[in-house]
């Protein structure tokens, strides 16, 4: 196989491989499901369950409450005893089917099921409680993009160094210098572009409500694209330097 044919084959491999790597980076998130139970409703944050560095995005879904300050000088009616803090007392009105509460403090008012997406050290707007399972349970889904970072840290450098070295080995000195440089630069540019395109397509896998996660992975895709061109440049310079020493 001639140098031109080898260059064309390596370009094709670079394009396909970069597209696949980009797709895996863009879609490379993992998740872990947790359940939250507590005797009293509480505001939630990622740090309650794990490190925000490892899992920077969290989805909370559960029966939510708002914490309301009250001063009940006159009895207030409730269908059942409310979850409360402070000096609040409630009594069942026999035969009437409701409770009367008086006193001052805080009452947790249920506002139905809510869904919140938190990132880093953010704290949920609502308070959550509930049973471990069932319609009143609070479900926590922790999201990480460690797989995307793994592809960036290991697969991208190995793949690009391999392609760059193969181009240098099989085409440097065998093609006219202008044609070689055009081929080498084209491989670098196409690889970077394909990683970016593959990454953008991979991001379509990320659910729409997880905008913070998409934001983090988008940065990894962009870094991978930039790193690719840098790897080609460094590999070329090192190859020439080592070649002169020989």
Image (cartoon, rainbow, N blue to C red):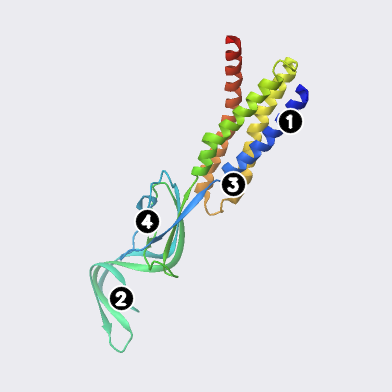
Distance in Å between CA atoms under marks 2 and 1: 74 Å
Does the rendering let one see residue 236?
yes
Measured along the vertical axis of the image, is residue 21 above or below residue 105? above
Say left or right for 216 vs 87. right
Q: Residues within 10 Å of mark 4 (few under 14, many from 20)?
A: many
Distance in Å between CA atoms under marks 4 and 2: 24 Å
Judging by the rendered image, the residue that carries numbered circle 3 is: 203
Furthest residue toward top: 245
Q: Earlier in the sequence, mark 3 or mark 2?
A: 2
Distance in Å between CA atoms under marks 3 and 2: 47 Å
Furthest residue toward left: 87
Q: Nearer the viewer, mark 4 or mark 2?
A: 4
Marks 4,1: beta carbons within 8 A: no
Distance in Å between CA atoms under marks 4 and 3: 27 Å
Marks 1,3: beta carbons within 8 A: no
Judging by the rendered image, the residue that carries numbered circle 1 is: 9
Say left or right for 74 vs 137. left
Judging by the rendered image, the residue that carries numbered circle 2 is: 81
Q: Residues within 10 Å of mark 1 (few under 14, many from 20)?
A: few
Marks 4,3: beta carbons within 8 A: no
Q: Earlier in the sequence, mark 4 or mark 3?
A: 4
Quadrant into which the N terminus falls:
top right
Percent of width and height locating residue 102: 24, 74
Judging by the rendered image, the residue that carries numbered circle 4 is: 44
Q: Secondary structure at mark 1?
A: helix
């Amino acid at each position: 196989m001639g140098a031109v044919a080898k260059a064309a084959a390596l370009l094709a491999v670079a394009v396909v491989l970069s597209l696949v790597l980009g797709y895996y980076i863009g879609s490379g998130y993992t998740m872990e499901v947790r359940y939250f139970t507590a005797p009293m409703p509480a505001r939630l944050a990622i740090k309650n369950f794990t490190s925000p560095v490892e899992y920077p995005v969290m989805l909370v879904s559960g029966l939510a409450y708002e914490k309301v300050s009250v001063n009940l000088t006159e009895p207030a009616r409730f269908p059942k005893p409310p979850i409360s803090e402070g000096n609040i007392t409630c009594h069942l009105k026999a035969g009437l089917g409701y409770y009367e509460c008086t006193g001052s403090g805080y009452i947790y008012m249920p506002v139905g099921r809510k869904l919140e997406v938190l990132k880093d050290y953010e704290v949920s707007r609502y308070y959550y409680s509930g049973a471990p399972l069932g319609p009143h349970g609070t479900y926590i889904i922790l999201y990480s993009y460690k797989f995307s970072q793994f592809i960036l840290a290991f697969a991208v450098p190995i793949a690009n160094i391999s392609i760059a070295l193969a181009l240098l080995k099989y085409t440097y000195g065998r093609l006219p210098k202008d044609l070689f440089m055009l081929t080498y630069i084209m491989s670098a540019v196409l690889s970077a572009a394909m990683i970016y395109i593959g990454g953008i397509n991979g991001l379509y896998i990320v659910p729409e409500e997880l905008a913070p996660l998409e934001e983090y992975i988008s940065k990894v895709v962009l870094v991978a694209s930039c790193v690719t061109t840098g790897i080609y440049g460094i590999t070329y310079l090192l190859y020439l330097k080592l070649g002169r020493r020989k």
